[in-house]
Amino acid sequence: MSVLVVGSVAFDSVETPFGMRENILGGSATYFSTSASFFTDVNLVAVVGDDFSQEHIDFLKSRNIDLRGLKREAGKTFHWKGRYGFDLNEAETLDTQLNVFQTFSPQIPAEYAAAEYLILANIDPELQLEVLDQVKKPKVIACDTMNFWISSKPEVLKKVISRVDFFIINEGEARQLTGEVNLVKAARAILAMGAKNLIIKRGEYGVLLFTTDGIFAAPAYPLESVFDPTGAGDTFAGGFMGYLASTGNFSGESVRQAIIFGSVMASFNVEDFSLDRLRTLQYSEIEERYKTFKAMTHFEAL
Amino acid sequence: MSVLVVGSVAFDSVETPFGMRENILGGSATYFSTSASFFTDVNLVAVVGDDFSQEHIDFLKSRNIDLRGLKREAGKTFHWKGRYGFDLNEAETLDTQLNVFQTFSPQIPAEYAAAEYLILANIDPELQLEVLDQVKKPKVIACDTMNFWISSKPEVLKKVISRVDFFIINEGEARQLTGEVNLVKAARAILAMGAKNLIIKRGEYGVLLFTTDGIFAAPAYPLESVFDPTGAGDTFAGGFMGYLASTGNFSGESVRQAIIFGSVMASFNVEDFSLDRLRTLQYSEIEERYKTFKAMTHFEAL
């Protein structure tokens, strides 16, 4: 089954201890879509400006991403500028130019309205609600957000949370949203807001999945060279939902496997700037690394 | 087989966001020994002052710990005072009074010299070398250290590292010792110093084991209330070595199980101040939590 992704397509300017790149392809929906495209068909809803080059369109098309929902408007594409220190877990935002994204109002094309797998990438929660109202009866909804919306629109965000199957958030944001320092208590508070399941991202420490059945802990892949963490969380979520949609199975076991596939995708993505590593990635490499995750975490039962 | 533990027995004064305790039982060897005693016999070599009360001696004896190597000297017992903020991963040391520990020179009783399992808890690496020279032919040596020795005696410490089977260190210390920010590179550098295996502790994020065969990643148990993280690393190491010694099996599989048992022990220990949780802990609870670790990390292979 195909996945519908709504979010941002952007240009990024990124500085890490290992180099600097200007105006490279970025945006939450770009990472989500590209990552999910390794597992299933993807429909993308986003907006770009008239400076968005054909080269990027061609790349997204080469990943078989359906771009009928990608609007092009007069003006400049959303631009994010950030920097990472040696602690690659946290970006410092240097500049955000919303540009055409400022007036973005996601219109779900009629042919996408029956989407069964929906990803609400990180955008204004008001827009996330608008999308939820346009999509008829999705089987699985995943949703991401960021610290900015938690502090500026917590009540709207909570309405979104109450309607999603997988709320995906990072560790610091989970604490910010709930006011709970302890992560297990924070997770319980978020589940109490109505999210069916919660995925807490912990950067190089992996992810925790909280469900009514219990907790699943997955490590991150210990990499020898992390070049650029931008988009790691979105790439994770794309792999996660892409795999779930490809199987149509949302059992606990399948969800855990999806988390590992998401972690595998994120581990590749950080190996190079922008989405460059995904440009050459082969499905056989994904399977190989999944096996490495299994070997890396296995221990005998009592 | 029994485990020989050499390290510190101390009084701690600890402040956490959840309370404050003065002059409670602490010390690296105390945590190591008590934790290991759930799995096997333990011989303890350490020194205390004349203020060390019979109550604590009785507790250690109740854990079946052999105290023939515990010297009592005139003066006060080693005293550590520390504080934790809401980020419970790192203690702030407020005061250290070495007292009788200042002139400690570990004498391994003749009846311990044939020990097959040796734990060098965190003490001056010069003393760790002295112990290594007194113990005839241990099968497995585990060794811990701290930032103070890394900065003050790195060359002596490296001599110790070259002689141990399991070097146990926390994440920040691994970076400090090697000057490598990337943890995989830091691990490789430490293995190149001659440690056969390396265990990197990451507090609430679990541990990584590096061997020549690859990496094993174990999460920490996500706890709803962490009261006092003091001794978590030592309790981990005690459970790890205690289990290994109890089986006499050092296969890769057995080492991974030992890491989980260590993680289980640490997860209990932080639930209360000092070693108080271990005072009431039952072996059945340890097995129960081991099973929870298994359930929490399991996912299907491809």
Image (tube, coloured by chain):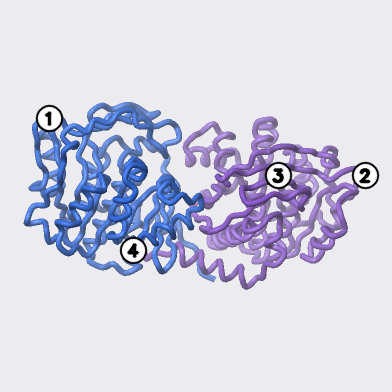
Chain colours: A purple, B blue
Q: CA distance from mark 4 to mark 2?
A: 62 Å
Relative image position of residue B37 (x, y in whole percent): 20, 51
**Helix, strand or loop status at disc 2:** loop
Residue positioned 72% across, 49% down in the render: A28
Quadrant assignment for the N terminus of chain B:
bottom left
Q: Quadrant of residue A95?
A: top right
Q: Is residue A250 in view? A: no
* Label 3 and label 2 in one chain: yes
Number of marks in the rendered image: 4
Q: Quadrant of residue A300?
A: bottom left
Instruction: Compare residues B103 and A127 and report the one nearer the observer.
Output: B103
Instruction: Determine which residue is flagged by label 1.
Output: B75
Q: What type is the residue that disc 4 sits on?
A: Lys
Amino acid on which disc 1 is placed: Gly
In this rendering, position of residue A6 left or right of residue A161: right
Q: CA distance from mark 4 to mark 1?
A: 39 Å
Q: Residue at x 17, y 64 (%)?
A: B137
Chain at tag 1: B
Q: Can you identify the residue that label 4 sits on? A: B196
User: Residue B136 at x, y = what percent?
Assistant: 14, 62
Q: Are marks 1 and 3 on the same chain?
A: no
Is residue A110 depicted above or below B176 in this figure? below
Say which label, 4 or 1, has the lower sequence index. Answer: 1
Q: Residue at x 69, y 30 (%)?
A: A152
| Mark 4 and mark 1 on one chain | yes
Judging from the image, what secondary structure is the residue with disc 1 in? loop
Above or below — where is A156 with respect to A164? above
Numbered tag placed on residue A122 in the rendering: 3
Q: Check disc 2 and report the residue beneath it.
A: A74
> Marks 1/3: CA distance?
62 Å
**Element under disc 3:** loop
Give the amino acid type for the residue marked by disc 2 in the picture.
Ala
